[in-house]
Image: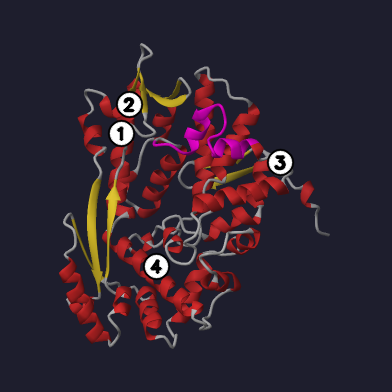
Amino acid sequence: MIANNTDRNKLKIINDPVYGFIAITDELIFDLIEHRYFQRLRRISQTALTSNVYPGAHHTRFHHAIGAMHLTKEAIEVLRFKGQEITDEEELSTLIAILLHDIGHGPYSHALEYSIVPVISHEEITVKFMDKLNQEFNGKLELAIEIFRNNYKKKFLHQLISSQLDMDRLDYLNRDSFYSGVVEGSVNSKRLIAMLNIAGDNLAIDDKGIYSVEKFLVARRLMYWQVYLHKTVIVSENLLTKVLQRARKLSLSGEELFSSSALNYFLKRSEDKQFVDQDLDLFSKLDDYDVFGAIKEWTNSSDKILSDLSRRLIDRRLPKIELGERKIDKDHVISLRNKVSELFNISFEETKNYVITGKVENNAYKKGSDSIYLLKKNGEVQDIAFSPDQQSITAISESMKKYFLIFPRELE
């Protein structure tokens, strides 16, 4: 006999490798976690192709969303302890908002946005998913959506979800550090959360917590250079983007490629078309498995560029990358493209699949924009970057750009 779903015990404990036991104490949150939209996040990598560098980095956005919700609950408890009034409804809605904050991410996240779903960002898709869930749950997500969109009167609730010191960043730094093994990214989340406060209507940090914030920002800067913007990660994700762009070009020209029905739809979808409910439904069925399963088959494609690019990605025969602070010389790029054209017997236009240029930027803290506020004992509030004894934070707030050039190793 199959039990009625409503008879299930919805109060659960999840054993998380980063924080230990996380309690699910609300039935609505349990039902949202059980929903197929959220379950899809089990099949969406948190760090895309970072595992090409750090083999342990195979954790998912499902892990991250649960962890961020856990930290948000801890933060709300701290703020209440310090006298901030937060109702049960506000707490639940904030937890729902952070739980669903990444639900709009697609397979390999940014690579997908730059290739086969370029007409809409993952943030916009997240809002569409939340609106759809709100309909299914009879309006119970109204306040969560209001908080997520920063339309609610208590702005600090939104800042727990999205700001320069939010629970999203706090979790992904710790989690990505844990799974990658890059210990420099680890931060003391308990200490930081214990130092949280409210100044006016903004999230702030007690002045004695400034060194914890400094460590947090340093960790973020290091994680970007060592993990998210590691040169091999840059190469891998650009190669993946080129594979998907090539597949999309072929599909739009009428060639039938092996793919799941959801992936096939987006490969052929016109960029001019508005993102509607049908798109959302098919997007909800799209995950990492669709993409990598297709790429494995594309290694046998009759199109030699698609098959070659796919094989290089699958076998991790990655191109060469030059990464530096100087802009890439255009004449050098043209020279490389001519060599690729001759070596691979392809047109000059097609060499853009092999010779790729771009830039990456690391900005751990932005002064004066969505600031992290320091709350002093006398009640004075100050942007942490302007604290007189925090020259290191001032340095961290300077944006650093690097330019890259990717080309086949055959040209070395």
Amino acid type at image mark 4: Thr
One can see residue 317 in this view? no
Above or below residue 155? Residue 310 is below
Q: In the image, what residue occupies the spot 64% across and 28% down?
A: 88
Task: Name the N-terminal-most of marks 4 and 3.
Answer: 3
Amino acid type at image mark 2: Asp
Q: In the image, what residue occupies the spot 34% across and 77% down?
A: 312
C-alpha separation, residue under disc 4 versus residue under disc 3: 38 Å
For numbered disc 4, what is the local secondary structure? Answer: helix
C-alpha separation, residue under disc 4 versus residue under disc 1: 32 Å
Where does the image place residue 35, in percent across and percent down from the top left? 66, 53
Above or below residue 296? Residue 184 is above
Q: Disc 2 marks which residue?
A: 383
Q: Residues within 10 Å of mark 3 (few under 14, many from 20)?
A: few
Q: What range of the chain is rendered magenta?
A: 143-164
Label 4 close to label 3 by CB (< 8 Å): no
Q: 399 and 274: which one is in front?
A: 274
Q: Residues within 10 Å of mark 1 (few under 14, many from 20)?
A: some
Q: Which mark is residue 367?
A: 1
Q: Disc 4 marks which residue?
A: 241
For numbered disc 3, what is the local secondary structure? Answer: loop
Task: Name the N-terminal-most of marks 2 and 4.
Answer: 4
Where does the image place residue 358, in percent across and percent down from the top left? 28, 61
For numbered disc 2, what is the local secondary structure? Answer: strand
Q: How many marks?
A: 4
